[in-house]
Image (cartoon, helix red, strand yellow):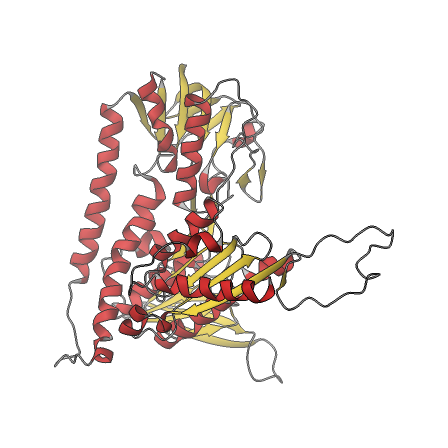
Amino acid sequence: MKDYDLIIIGSGGGLKLRAAANLGKRVAVIEREDMGGTCLNRGCIPSKMLIHVAEEVEKMKELSKYFVHLENSEFNFDWEKLIEETTAKVIQDSQKIEQACKSGPVDLYQGHARFVSDRVVEVNGEKLTGDVIVIATGSRPHIPTIPGLKDTPFMTSREALRNFDQPKKMLVIGGGYIAVELGYFYGMMGTDVEFLVRSGMLKYEDKDVRSIFEQKFCSKFPVHFGITPTRVEYKHDQFFVYGEDKLSLDTSVTGVEKVFVADSLFVATGVVPNADDLGLDNTGIQRKNGYIQVDERMQTDVDGVYAIGDVVGNYLFRHSVNFEGEWLLEHLFLGDKDDDKKKLKYPPMPHAVFSSPQIAGVGKTEDELRTEGWIELGEGKSKTEEEDKEPDGKEKKEEKIFLKAVHEYKKTGMGMAMKDDSGMVKLLIDKKTRKVLGAHIVGEKASDMIHLLIGAMTWDRTVDDLLAMIYIHPALSEVIKGALKKIEYQLAVNG
């Protein structure tokens, strides 16, 4: 049995710990698929390479609003070449990671890792043990249990990103990140795309952002809300998706069934953690709803065995597993060895949706604040002296009051130049501390502009700090300043 200081299972975010080998540690990396993990091979990198092309095409299609008219509104492109180039670039980067591991101070095992006991892992018939084992196996597409689906050649994100034949028509089941990103790409590039959505799109976004997104997105593509797929058939090279229409206007009929037909079907209904085939039943490692359970140091129920990333499910982003991996490297190999009580503390965790319009956010949504007992400035009622006391006579806890401001792109110089009629910034501010509780942006360059507000939350900066800056005029970031000025006014009026 080979003995290591560190065993890393998974070559995505887990590779952040590979640097332990540069400290003289004996390190093994185990990967059963392409090096680089889901993000590089089947996720954020290839999808953004394709979505960027779709964004450029959309801009071209909208040139008429700037009085630029193309003589021929049709455009030609080489779909196969686009997919080939994207796939080749991803494979090249994956091979570079593989070569770096093979030629560097780590042992690379290309195979499926399974635990045979708490601290022993088997791969390709060989048993390995380690002082530290890190599970970073990520997640995979969730496949809903729709009758007939598994017997059809449907696509998940894995196949959709390497599909060399452009479909004429595509049905998309789902309304989350992956559905609206890749569905947008296919639709903007000329495929006739229809979305089948059970409830709303991007349901975890702030309500005002979600409302704007749905309005704009539905103006581009047909979106059928309230549809629950009940069965799928595939015949004559066509998909037939049957669904119960729960929003049917015909109230006299319950469970109205509709059928949708297309030559391709893209299923994007979330992800599940890759923890079910690791042999964890042979260990004391516990799971909940499929996700590996960890403490505040990312350690599982087995001492010395850690887990990070999608397989844990604290956050399902590549930037979050990168943060976890870097923290674990510092905690286990670079920090104070006596500091066993050190706990991982996440800074504000941002996110972005790379569709059209683009979305970015950090911190709480308005609904989350209200659920936690916050009230918006002006909603509180004046209370008598008696109402300010608990039944036992003690003073009631001070109300948590937030301020809200929305500022639209079109009210800035750059937004006016862009002729953006829907983009906006929404800020949620703690009245007492004047700090940012949440920030949400919908519109072009949202994923770039949000970083000013991520920084403000990370370093506990106030509205006053953000307004002390000089904003370039007429840069798009002035829309953030506009929202801040509205907050400043509310604070000045209300104290």
- Residue 391 percent across, percent down from the top left: 86, 55
Q: Residue at x 24, y 70 (%)?
A: 59
* 118 in relation to 214, above or below: above
User: Along the horizontal axis of the image, is 464 left or right of 370?
Assistant: left
- Residue 379 percent across, percent down from the top left: 65, 68
Does residue 189 appear in this view?
yes
Q: Residue at x 73, y 52 (%)?
A: 397
* 405 in relation to 311, above or below: below
Quadrant, the C terminus: bottom right
Front residue (pair 105, 276): 105
Considering every residue shown, the one lying at the far right of the view is: 392
Q: Residue at x 60, y 58 (%)?
A: 369
Front residue (pair 296, 280): 296
- Residue 302 percent across, percent down from the top left: 56, 25
Number of residue marks:
0
Q: Residue at x 38, y 37 (%)?
A: 13
User: Along the horizontal axis of the image, is 101 left or right of 402?
Assistant: left
Does residue 350 appear in this view?
no
Front residue (pair 178, 112): 178
To which quarter of the image does residue 56 belong? bottom left
* 473 in relation to 219, above or below: above
* 280 in relation to 144, above or below: above
Front residue (pair 81, 39): 39
User: Along the horizontal axis of the image, is 394 left or right of 376?
Assistant: right
- Residue 247 percent across, percent down from the top left: 55, 77
Quadrant, the N terminus: top left
